[in-house]
Amino acid sequence: MNSTIVEPESRKAAAMRFSLDGGNGIPIYRQIIQQIEYAILSERIRPGDRLPTIRSLAVELKTNPNTIAKAYGELEIRGILETQVGSGTYVSDKAPLLGEAASAGERLNRKIQEVLGRFVQDMKALGVAGEDLVSLVKNYGRGNQTAPFPGSRAFNEEEKDK
């Protein structure tokens, strides 16, 4: 999994972190598209912010420049990004579409619900549900990513030892 922080170049704004996972089944260019959309919806990057060049982002993420170009190209076709020859690629005024004429807050909320829904489904598929899921998220939020969650074999063995 590659991870890098990209600072928008046009003005001071919150850094954008790209985190790519080649093993999750989602193509890298789709992960880049999703992360740019999330950054726009959460206002970490704003209209007018300049994105890194294709070449520089490819070097940072250790991926093929064609992959970055494909992601930027798709976002440009959607009108979310604008490329100015010789100047760079910028975030446009058009927000990612998640429904008809929704406000920025509604679009962000829908995207959060979408991501959360996938997360809960994935956890259920792994056998984690209900209070165990809540406990797992709380431990992760406290920085304790290695703590076994209730209901897991590791947790049950740890409880037996007490």
Image: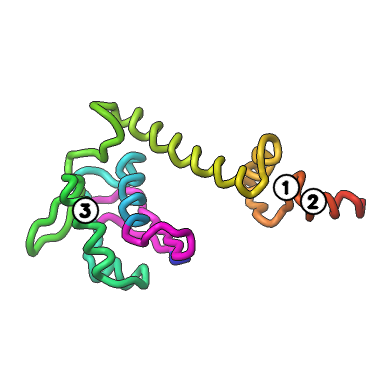
Q: Secondary structure at mark 3?
A: helix
Q: Secondary structure at mark 1?
A: loop
Sequence-wise, the earlier of marks 2 and 1 is 1
Expressed as whole percent of the image width and height from the top left, the position of residue 103 reads 29, 27
Displayed quadrant of residue 95: top left
C-alpha span from label 2 to label 1: 6 Å
Within-10-Å neighbours for mark 2: few <14, some 14–19, many 20+: few
Tell me which segment is drawn in magenta. Answer: 3-29
In the visual, does 112 lie left or right of 139? Answer: left
* Circle on res. 74: 3
Q: Residue at x 24, y 69 (%)?
A: 66
Amino acid carrying mark 2 in the image: Phe
Count of numbered badges drawn on the protein: 3
Q: Secondary structure at mark 2?
A: helix
Within-10-Å neighbours for mark 1: few <14, some 14–19, many 20+: many
Q: Residue at x 22, y 63 (%)?
A: 69
Residue 12: in magenta span = yes
In the visual, does 140 lie left or right of 76? Answer: right
C-alpha span from label 3 to label 2: 45 Å
Camera-side residue of 153 and 85: 153
Q: Foreground mark, 3 or 1?
A: 3
Q: Would you say the residues marked 2 and 1 are in contact, meaning their CB atoms lie under 8 Å apart?
A: yes
